[in-house]
Image: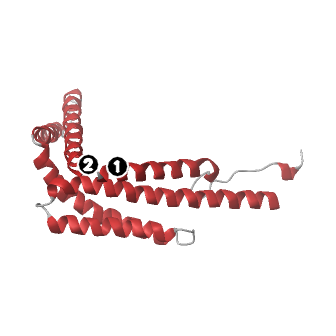
Amino acid sequence: MPENSIRTTVPHPLFGDPRRNWGWLLGLGVLSTILGVIGLGMLFTLSIASAFVFGVLLAAAGLMQFVDAFKCKGWKGTLSHLLIAVLYFVVGLVMLIDPLQAAVALTLVLGSALIVIGALRITSGFQHRSEPGWKWAIGAGVLSLLLGIVVLAQWPVSGIWVLGLIVAVELMANGWAYIFFGLAARKAAKREDEESVAA
C-alpha cells in the first residue's frame, strides 16, 4: 500500500474530530435557540417550573447523601456529611412547597452566575478570534453579562418573571454560541479535507 494512501487522523485542538462533531454542535445550537424562543412566551410558568425542578434535584441530592452517610460509618466527617444532607433536603423541600418564593431567591443566584458566564464567554470569543463568527460568541457573552446586571439591579421586584426570562435568553445565547462553534468546526473540517486532497 502506498505511503500517501495511509492517513493518520490528528484530533483538532479545539473540536476533536470536526467531521463528526460539527453537526452535533450546530444541531444543539439550533435546538437550544428554539427552546429559548418558546420559553419567552411562558416566563411565569418557566420561572415556577425551574424553581420546582431545582427543588426536586436538591431534595434528591439530600436523600442520596443521607443514605451515603450511613453507608460510610466510621468516617471522621460523617456528622458534617449528615448535616449537609439535611440542609439539601430541607432547602429542596421548602422550594417544592413554595416555588414562587424559591424563584425569587434563585433569581439572585442566577443573576450573579450570568455575570460570570458572560465574562467567560467573552474571553472564549477573544480566544477564537481567528475563526469566522467570533464576534457572535462575544455578543452572546455581552448579552449574558448585561442580563445578569439587569437582574441584580431589579431584584427582588421582578424575581417572579425574571427567572423564566433568564432561562429563555440563556438558552438562546447558548444556542448562538453552539451554532458559532458548529460552523467553525465545519470550516475546520473543510480545511482538513482540502489539505488532505492537496497532500
Q: Is residue 145 above or below residue 42?
A: below
Q: In the orientation shown, which residue stands out farthest toward the front?
A: 41
Helix, strand or loop for disc 1: helix
Residue 38's tag is 1
Query: Image quadrant for the N terminus?
Result: top right
Q: Is residue 20 above or below residue 182?
A: above
How far across and down, in percent of the image, does residue 130 sit? 57, 72
Helix, strand or loop for disc 2: loop
Q: Is residue 2 above or below residue 123?
A: above
Label 2 crowd (10 A; few <14 / some 14-19 / many >=20) = some
Residue 32 vs residue 45, the one in the foreground: 45
Residue 143's tag is none
Task: Please give left or right for residue 8 compared with residue 68 in the image.
Answer: right
The structure's colour scheme is secondary structure
Residue 192 vs residue 87, the one in the foreground: 192
How far across and down, in percent of the image, does residue 103 sit? 16, 50
Residue 87 vs residue 110, the one in the foreground: 110
Give me the C-alpha separation between circle 1 and circle 2: 7 Å
Residue at 26% over, 65% down:
148
How far across and down, in percent of the image, does residue 85 sit? 17, 38
Residue at 10% over, 38% down:
97
Query: In the image, what residue type sits under mark 2?
Result: Met
Dots 1, 2 in contact, CB < 8 A: yes
Residue at 19% over, 28% down:
70
Task: Please give left or right for residue 3 compared with residue 90 in the image.
Answer: right
Residue 144 vs residue 124, the one in the foreground: 144
Q: Is residue 94 above or below residue 126?
A: above
Query: In the image, what residue type sits under mark 1?
Result: Ile
